[in-house]
Image: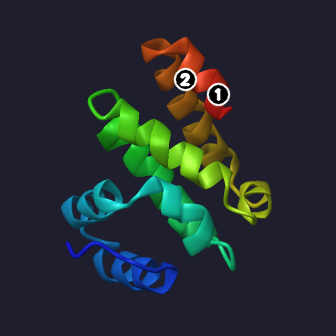
Amino acid sequence: TQVPTTGGELYRSWRRVRGEEAELVGLFRSLPPAKLPHWLKGELEEELLVDMLRVIRHKFLPDEAPHALALLEGLLGVPRLGIALKFLSASDRALLHHSLAALAQLDPHAARAAA
């Protein structure tokens, strides 16, 4: 998976690998979390957010907790995060909750900072 350098490249890469779990995990593993607010300032598609939450919960936790936390912290800076969160289904909101709970079990201070 080629590492994206812009928001447009992130979306193109995501759409290309969306149905391939290993590729999707590789894409999200390659993301520099600090760039997410800049890359996603214009839009944050709900489906991208949900895919990120699924990978964080089911692939990055617990073994890659630092990267999972960094991605969540990066998402916190995305201007349209609040809007995207409002449109999440109950099951997708539960996914976010379970990810934060899993982080809290690993490091209670880290999960509180991300919440």
Badge 2 marks a residue whose secondary structure is helix
Above or below 112: residue 72: below
Given residues 89 and 58, the one toward you in this image is 58
> Residue 112's quadrant in the figure?
top right
* Image coords of residue 11 (percent x, y): 46, 80
* Image coords of residue 17 (percent x, y): 29, 75
Which residue matches tag 1? Answer: 113
Above or below 54: residue 11: below
Badge 1 marks a residue whose secondary structure is helix
What sort of colour scheme is used for the picture? Answer: rainbow
Q: Is residue 114 left or right of residue 20?
A: right
| Image quadrant occupied by the C terminus | top right
Work out how far the residue at label 2 is from the one at label 1, CA to CA, in angstroms: 5 Å
* Tag shown at residue 110: 2
Given residues 94 and 32, the one toward you in this image is 32
Q: Are marks 2 and 1 in contact (CB under 8 Å)?
A: yes
Residue shown at 29%/60% (left/top)? 30
Above or below 95: residue 111: above
* Tag shown at residue 82: none
Kind of residue sitting beneath label 2: Ala
- Number of disc labels: 2
Residue shown at 35%/59% (left/top)? 28
Given residues 21 and 89, the one toward you in this image is 21
Q: Residues within 10 Å of mark 1 (few under 14, many from 20)?
A: few
Kind of residue sitting beneath label 1: Ala
Residue shown at 47%/13% (left/top)? 105
| Image quadrant occupied by the N terminus | bottom left
Q: Residues within 10 Å of mark 2 (few under 14, many from 20)?
A: some
Residue shown at 60%/48% (left/top)? 92
